[in-house]
Image: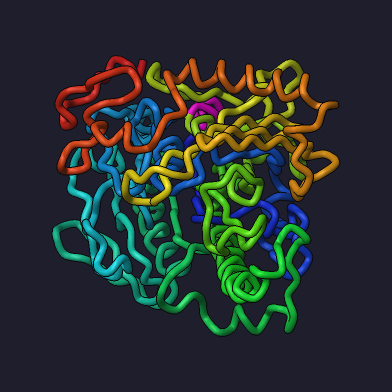
Amino acid sequence: MNSRPNVVFLLTDQLRASSLPLYGERQIQTPNIDRLASEGVTLTNAISSCPVCTPARAMLVTGRHPQTTGHLINSTRTRHSELSIADAFGRRGYRTGWVGKWHLHTGVWPAVDHMPQHPDWVPEGRDRLGFDYWRAYNQHMVYFNGFVQGDDWNYLRWDGYETDGLLNYGREMMDAAGDDPFCLFLSPHQPHFTPFEFAPAAYYERLPAQLELPDNVPPEQMEASLTMYRHYLAMILALDDMVGNLDRYLRETGRTDNTVVVLASDHGTQAGAHGVRPWQKKYPYEESIRIPVIVRYPGVIAAGSRSDALTAMPDFFPSLCGLAGIPVPRSVEGHDLSGAWQGRPGAFEQDAVLTMNFSERFDWFADGMEWRGLRTKDHSYARWLNGKIELYDLRSDPLQMNNLAESAAHQSLRSRLEGRMTALQARRGDALVPCTDWKHWLDNQRRVVRNAYGDLGDPEKSPDWSLLY
């Protein structure tokens, strides 16, 4: 067995922390996810810094913020010069692979009737940011017998449900690696919305006849939210089986002790909380921004441990480098939190993370919904462009039902949080302005040609490889 650890990152889509039993949900059982947590560390303060698919995924893969990558809305084509986690691991002898949803390209654009249902392509080369094995799609919502890109311009269809189909491709990549170390991302679309069929019937049969939702779901959203939540929980049960099947494969192939396994999500979902439409995200509330994260690395991370270290999307890349002993590229803006994940005394932690949303729409620059926020271990703060300010004490009010922004007793706290948020914005060159002010960041092919620091030139120029070392 190679001494360098493998990495398997299971990236779910729209899975919020509070919907797992590990974080408090009591209406389903997820024995495989629970077992993974019992063998690793559970992060209790993992935050999706910008709770929208493309911006969040860009942060994960590049370790950089939207103000730098230019990924402010979905279906934006990534600059070829961006250095990725695949580049960092691949240049150190790792085989790299991406299986499942990518969403860092345009794919089929525009989406047919706003209901993506066709094969779409991410060209070979830098549009894949260094991932070699490729069984991916940019963005579609076909969960049964869906399609990924093959080794040429044709497509492959997986057999059955997506969580099973994608894991089969993942096994293919890991089998082919032999004794070489690998870095594999498995990215199922579940538990995201689809206009088609959500999940196999067997998973619905494992749900209670009557579901309940938290007190922050108002009566006018209850019926639609309960319908949504039944689909959502059924898909989570499918994900739990995927975790179990992945774990079984790693044990059968003797890889468990030498593999870092991460379970995480790109963002959460509101499920009706605060009166927001059920499948919506993009809000500065815990339902949208707080994600589940489990990291297992036997012998390095203590089994059954928990960490309250604040972890944002750009931090995964450098933290995985830290666990694997790989130098963090100088392009990365996130922090190596591997010491904090291990519970190492004196390890670096951050006191707050910047949160944000740019557009009212997912795929277009549309004014509305612009806000910036700050998440600490104890508080959530947000300032909206329309003037609304929200401040919540997460210890005493985890459902965020008591806005303290206008409370006289909390003005000093509000001022401190505002100042810290402003400082983090300044570090990113960020300003809270109307969304359409950023339209010129993309060209007519939805390629990034500008960021917060100015014009970037040719979006297809090669990377500066010296930044890796």
Residue drawn at x 70%, y 19% as measured from the top left: 415
Query: In terms of depth relative to the viewer, which is nearer, 365 or 266?
Result: 365
Q: Is residue 371 left or right of residue 76?
A: right
What's the magenta bit mostly, secondary-structure-wise?
helix
- Tell how many labels: 0
Magenta segment boundaries in residue numbering: 318-324
Residue drawn at x 47%, y 39% as measured from the top left: 370
Q: Position of residue 216 (x, y in %)?
A: 74, 57
Q: Position of residue 413 (x, y in %)?
A: 76, 23
Query: In terms of depth relative to the viewer, which is nearer, 411 or 460?
Result: 411
Magenta segment includes 323? yes
Query: In terms of depth relative to the viewer, which is nearer, 109 or 143?
Result: 109
Q: Position of residue 71 (x, y in %)?
A: 35, 37
Residue drawn at x 77%, y 19% as measured from the top left: 412
Magenta segment includes 222? no
Q: Is residue 200 left or right of residue 140?
A: right
Q: Position of residue 396 (x, y in %)?
A: 85, 41
